[in-house]
Amino acid sequence: MSDLNTMRHAIRRPNLKDYSREALRAIFKERGWAAYRADQVATWLYKNDVEDVDGMTNVPAEIRSAIAAEFDTRSLEVVETQKSVDGTQKLLLGAFDGARIEAVLIPEERRNTLCVSTQVGCPLTCSFCATGALGFTRNLTTGEIVDQVLQAMRVMEPETTLTNLVFMGMGEPLLNLPAVSEAIRILTDQKAFALAPRRVTVSTSGVLPQIAPLLEVAPIHLAVSLHATTDEVRDVLVPLNKKFPIAELLETLRAEPRINRRRPVFFEYTLMEGVNDSVEDARRLPGLLSGIPCKLNVIPMNPHPDAPYRAPSRETINRFTAALHDGGMRVTLRRDRGRDIDAACGQLANRRPGPVQKTTNESSSAV
Ligand code: SAH
Ligand code: SF4
C-alpha cells in the first residue's frame, strides 16, 4: 500500500483546479494557446461540471489532448455520504494518497452552507477539537479544496444552489494560506463559481501574521475562534494563544482597516461547562471587544470522545447570552447541525478507518 502510494505520488500531475483563471491564462499563454481558452476551460470545469477534457467541445482538439496529457482534473473521490435527521449531509472524501477529509453541507430555509476542510488533521491541537486530536498529516491543495465544493454540489437537491461557504472544517486555513487564497479566487471568480465574497467566511484560531494577507485576497468575512476571556483559559483551550495572546489578537483586529461595520469579524465562542461559561466571562466580553466591529457566535460544545468538556445546561447558556445582550453585544446562538453523524463543529475526525474504495449513499441512523 505504501509503495503504491509513493508511486501514485510520484506520477501525480498538476491539476487544472489548482490554478485560478488568471494563473491558467498565464500557463496557456506560455504554451502558445489563446488566453481565452483558459476561460473556456474554467467554464467547463466550474459552471458545467465537466471534468473530462474531451468533453470541452469548444476547445480545439489539439489543445484538449495536450491538456489531457499534462494535467489531471480530479482530486477527490466520494468515499461515503451520510445524511443527518436534520438534512445536514457529511461527505467523506478520499485523496490520491489515501488521506481522508470531510465536508459538511448544511441546508437551511433560505440558504445552503458548505463547510470545507483545508488540512488533513490540524497541527494546533486545541484541547476541545476532534480534528486537533488527530494530529497533522498535510495541507490540502487548491484543487482538493475546490473539489469539495464541486462534490457537494453534486449531492444537493435539484433546484437548490450553494449560497454560503465557510472554511470551518478540518484544519487551520491560515496555515495553508497559498492554497486557500487560490481556492477563494476560483470560488469567487465570476467565470467560475461566482460566489459573492461576502458569503465566504474563513475561520482562524488566530494566526495573526496571515490575517492581513488573507483579507487582501477578496472582501470575504473573517471568523476568529476566541473561546475565552483570559489568557490563562485560552492557553489551555487554544495552545496557539501562547504565541499570539488575546491582547495581541484583538489589537491586530482593531488595527485591520478591512474590518468595519460592513464587514465585521465573527467571533466564535464555544461554551464549555465550568470552563468559560461564567457570567463574569460574559461581562468581560463587551469591554474586551470594544472598538472591533463584530458579532459573537456562541456555540455550545459539541461533545466527542477525545475531549473532556461538555456543553453547559440550557439555563447557563441563557444566562451567558443574556449577560452579553445586557452588555450591548450582537450575539447569535448557533444551532447544532448534524450532531447525530458527527458533522457538527469540531466533530470532524474521520471516525471510519479503512481503504478508500466504496461510495455508499446510506442514511445515517437517527439518534
Ligand atoms: N481551525 C479553524 C477552523 C476550523 S474549526 C478555527 O479553529 O477557527 C471551526 C470552529 O469550530 C472553530 O471556531 C472551532 O473552535 C470550533 N470547534 C472546534 N471543536 C469544537 C467542538 N467540539 N464544539 C464546538 N465547536 C468546536
Ligand atoms: Fe485546528 Fe481549529 Fe481544531 Fe484548533 S479548533 S485544532 S485550529 S481545527
Image: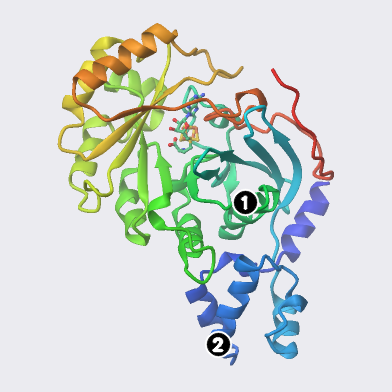
> Which labelled disc corresponds to residue 30?
2
Q: Residue 19, how many percent across, how many down?
A: 55, 69
Tell me the SS state at disc 2: helix
- Is residue 20 toward the left or the right of residue 361 in the image? left
Q: For this view, does 135 lie left or right of residue 263?
A: right
Ranked by sequence position, the earlier of labels 1 and 2 is 2
Give the amino acid type for the residue marked by disc 1 in the picture: Gln
Q: In what element is the residue under mark 1? A: helix
Q: Nearer the viewer, residue 338 or 217?
A: 338
Q: Is residue 357 left or right of residue 222?
A: right
Which amino acid, by three-letter code, is at mark 2?
Answer: Glu
Give the side of residue 75 with respect to residue 213, left or right. Answer: right
Cα distance between the residues tagged 1 and 2: 29 Å
Q: Which residue is mark 1?
A: 148
Count of numbered marks: 2
Q: Is residue 156 above or below residue 10?
A: above
State the image coordinates of residue 352 (x, y, percent, origin top left): 75, 31
